[in-house]
Image (cartoon, rainbow, N blue to C red):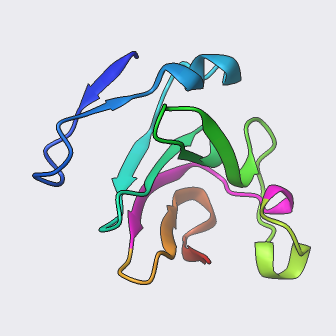
Amino acid sequence: PRNLRAGLDARVTSLDLQGLDTLDAHVITCLAVGTDGTRVVCTGSALYTLSPSGLPTLLAGHQITTGFIDNALAGQGGAARFCSPSGIAVDGAGNVLVVDMFNHALRKVA
């Protein structure tokens, strides 16, 4: 999608998601906006932050490969694995909280 209307925060009226086209991401399963304007999306089994222009940067996980690997144990966010992230939130400290549905876990990405 080119623009996604978000009523999550009065300061956010639309999100330019044009950069996600580079990921071949057809389905965005969840979206969160932090108090500082940080935008995070789930697509596949990966989490991405979006730049102000909408370009994605991998935060954690892998677009296709699922599983359970904690990024604290793996040492890098890209080495983390999720199995169907179905909800995300950004807390006041900027941590991303992830509902990892099929791993039956609530996980924190710092």
Q: Assign the C terminus to one quadrant of the image.
A: bottom right
Query: Do we see residue 3 in this rendering?
Result: yes
x%, y% of residue 11?
Answer: 16, 51
Q: Assign the N terminus to one quadrant of the image.
A: top left
x%, y% of residue 105?
Answer: 56, 74
Which stretch did the figure color magenta? 78-90
When asked about the image quadrant of residue 23, the answer is: top right
Q: Is residue 40 left or right of residue 62?
A: left
Taking 34 as reference, is 19 above or below it?
above
Report the front residue among 1 and 64: 1
Taking 86 as reference, is 98 above or below it?
below
Q: Is residue 8 left or right of residue 66?
A: left
- Please tell me which residue is depicted at 43% across the width and 57% down the height of the picture: 38
When asked about the image quadrant of residue 60, the answer is: bottom right
Report the front residue among 82 and 61: 61
- Please tell me which residue is depicted at 78% across the width and 56% down the height of the picture: 67
- Please tell me which residue is depicted at 50% across the width and 69% down the height of the picture: 96
- Asked if residue 79 lies in the magenta stretch, the reply is yes
Report the front residue among 92 and 63: 92
Q: Is residue 39 left or right of residue 5?
A: right
- Asked if residue 20 lies in the magenta stretch, the reply is no
Q: Count of labels shown? A: 0
Query: Do we see residue 44 in this rendering?
Result: no
x%, y% of residue 24?
Answer: 66, 17
Q: Is residue 9 left or right of residue 70?
A: left
- Please tell me which residue is depicted at 63% across the width and 65% down the height of the picture: 103
x%, y% of residue 94?
Answer: 47, 75
When asked about the image quadrant of residue 78, the answer is: bottom right
